[in-house]
Image (tube, grey):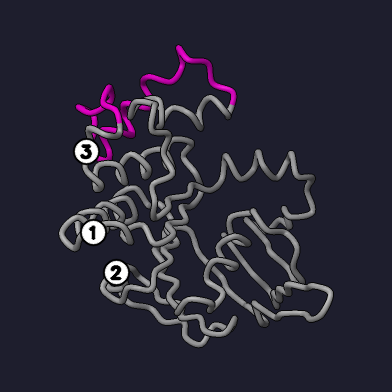
């Protein structure tokens, strides 16, 4: 599904050029659940910005389903990103004044759906993450774990080809983190959702099927963890 070939990324200013991704070669197949792990400053965030079609200023080749999409215009690329990838963040990135339903509905509206067309889809995905009874609640009425489930539902609503979860348990306690990771595993194994999980927490890695370790902008390890 995803293929990076000899990808290099530089940040340049007037005085120097910083080489932040170095000869990255990476293939991701549909249905994988991958952990990308590395210390702060290793290049994890740069890599996922590239994978998520946010950053297209790099050297090398990014093929998605055999096509080099990053030559597209910003408008086309934005539409592809909305339909292709779902993002889950550490801080949830939800809209506080909206209900659970409205937060999950929003990507559908961006994608051209009308208000009367969204209810069935939103309720189905809320049921999938165990929040069907919370649709009319506001965020302040939810726990941190429930808010992250809302964020996951929002990421799934357009049926993306893959999810990028950036430190999704970073703001949660260990028990809630375990619940969220089990939800990701269920989505991966039962619904075949492809998941790219970025973490610095080794406790999250065993939930995944593959580990990619990155340090100083280079992939130093790529190994299978479970079938």
Dot 3 surroundings within 10 Å: few (below 14), some, or many (20 or more)? Answer: some
Tell me if label 3 and label 2 are in contact, CB under 8 Å: no
Give the structural element (helix, strand or loop) at label 3.
loop
Q: Is residue 42 left or right of residue 227?
A: right
- Mark 3–mark 2 Cα distance, whole angstroms, equals 21 Å
Q: Nearer the viewer, residue 151 or 192?
A: 151
Q: Secondary structure at mark 2?
A: helix
Instruction: Tell which of 55 and 112 is nearer to you.
Output: 55
In this rendering, the count of numbered labels is 3
The residue beneath circle 3 is: 130
Residue at left 79%, top 45%? 73
Q: Position of residue 45 (x, y in %)?
A: 54, 66
Q: Nearer the viewer, mark 3 or mark 1?
A: 1
Q: Which residue is mark 1?
A: 177
Under circle 1, the secondary element is: helix
Q: Which residues are magenta?
A: 112-138
State the image coordinates of residue 223 (x, y, percent, origin top left).
41, 82
The residue sitting at 37% across, 27% down in the picture is 122
Q: Which mark is residue 204?
A: 2
């Amino acid at each position: 599904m995803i293929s990076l070939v000899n990808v290099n990324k530089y940040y340049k200013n007037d005085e120097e050029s910083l080489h932040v991704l170095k000869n990255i070669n990476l293939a991701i197949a549909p249905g994988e659940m991958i952990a990308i792990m590395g210390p702060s400053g290793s290049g994890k965030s740069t890599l996922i910005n590239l994978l998520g079609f946010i950053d297209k200023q790099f050297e090398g080749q990014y093929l998605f389903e055999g096509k080099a999409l990053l030559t597209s215009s910003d408008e086309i690329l934005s539409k592809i990103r909305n339909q292709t990838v779902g993002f889950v963040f550490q801080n949830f990135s939800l809209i506080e004044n909206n209900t659970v339903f409205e937060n999950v509905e929003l990507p559908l509206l961006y994608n051209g759906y009308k208000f009367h067309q969204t209810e069935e889809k939103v309720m189905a995905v809320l049921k999938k993450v165990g929040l069907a009874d919370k649709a009319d609640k506001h965020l302040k009425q939810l726990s941190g774990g429930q808010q992250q489930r809302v964020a996951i539902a929002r990421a799934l609503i357009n049926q993306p080809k893959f999810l990028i979860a950036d430190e999704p348990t970073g703001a949660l306690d260990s028990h809630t983190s375990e619940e969220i990771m089990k939800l990701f595993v269920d989505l991966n194994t039962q619904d075949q959702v492809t998941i790219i999980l970025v973490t610095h927490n080794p406790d999250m890695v065993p939930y995944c099927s593959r580990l990619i370790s990155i340090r100083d902008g280079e992939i130093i390890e790529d190994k299978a963890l479970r079938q």
